[in-house]
Image (tube, helix red, strand yellow):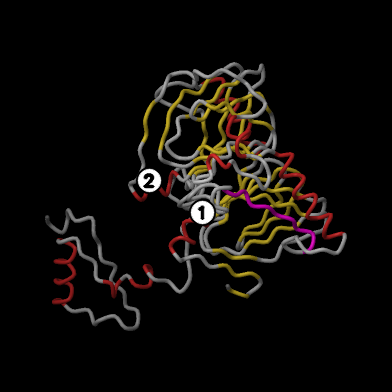
Amino acid sequence: MTSTESPVRIAVSDAPGQPERTADLDALYRRFEDELLVPLWTEIGDLMPAHPTPAARAHLWRWDTLLPLAGRAGELVPVGRGGERRAIALANPGLGGAPYATPTLWAAIQYLCPREDAPVHRHTQHAFRFVVAGEGVWTVVDGDPVAMRRGDFLLTPGWRFHGHHNVSDAPMAWLDGLDIPFAHQTGSGFFELGPDTVTERATPARSRAERLWAHPGLRPVSSAGERTGSSPIAAYRWEHTDQALTDQLALEDEGHPGVVEPGHAAVRFTNPTTGGDVLPTIRAEFHRLRPGAATATRREVGSSVFQVFTGEASVRVGDAAWTATRGDLFAVPSWQPLTISTRSGADLFRFSDTPIFERLGQDRVQTEGAAR
């Protein structure tokens, strides 16, 4: 390979500590380039910065813009083999046009027209659905029909066959979250087609997985030995999430501990077989702020995406600031300071890649200057 064909270009710097530029050194660098080699001394500032310097940017996507665009796609783009899903991914402006909300997280608005099916497939990437509004769609996971309704958080763990069908006369849109970027960067993804249409057409109020697993504090003895990386609960229903948040704030009023900070209640969705996160690569939480409440400023290694469920929130991520309302989504890159406040009160759904960094021993959190 000649140097003109080499994809490697060594960035020569005049920074302190760099060797003096000579003809011999330039010749050595050209040989490095030819052999696809890069000396650490020219790259260490980029490879090992003093703190995370993510390429991803803080960004806000407006629901009032996303939903009409998804509806127009519903008029023009069929769902079927080839495209598989009418899903519109959020593309972070710092990631060169890649369809990623952050370097590890994929977020998209999926839209299903009345009486429409999304075909069955499976993939090793882990997925969830969060419903900001609407009902009428059932997602069928390994033959188990799961109702999708406002406020519900629903799981599709990796390598489970799944499809969706809309039994209503109205369209429905929801948030899809997956670890697609992580699987893509690590070269670990597999994909397989299933039937062209959803074969299980039942529409039960509760899925089989919920009937077996979704009883607070209880687990079936018949499955006591089951320990999986993903939660077996198919749907975490809004009525339970709402009650848990309401009870936290009520206990605060009574002078008992339980909230994250004054006026800020939060819950984490968990796997009943392990007590850990619902998916191996994704953490999911729900946050409620009273009117007039504000969070502490927080930095965290790893990235996250929020969606406002109700109310209005003032959000600051690094140097970016917005007022976010129902359905709006925003990305928080790694180690960017985040503060959320609200005058009227707000509920927010959050998902993050925190489990990845905890398993790697690279997690770090700083709140109001105190690292832990």
Give the class, few, some or many, for how many residues have Cα within 10 Å of label 1's Cα (few <14, many ≥20). Answer: many
Pick the front one: 92 or 298: 298
Real-space Cα separation, disc 1 to disc 2, in angstroms: 15 Å
Quadrant of the rendered structure where residue 195 is? Answer: top left
Marks 1, 2: nearer the viewer: 1
Query: The magenta stretch spans which residues?
Result: 262-271
The disc, 1 or 2, on the residue closer to the chain's N-terminal end is 2
Q: Residues within 10 Å of mark 2 (few under 14, many from 20)?
A: few
* Above/below status of 295 relative to 136: below
In what quadrant of the picture does the C terminus appear?
bottom right
Residue shown at the point (79%, 59%) measured from the top left: 263
Query: Which residue corresponds to mark 2?
Result: 184
Q: Nearer the viewer, residue 314 or 361?
A: 361
* Residue farthest to the front, as pictured: 221
Mark 1 residue element: loop
Q: Residue 264 colored magenta? A: yes
The residue carrying mark 1 is 353
Amino acid type of the residue that numbered disc 1 sits on in the rendered structure: Asp
- Give the percent coordinates (x, y) of residue 218: 65, 45
- Was residue 68 drawn as part of the magenta stretch in this picture? no
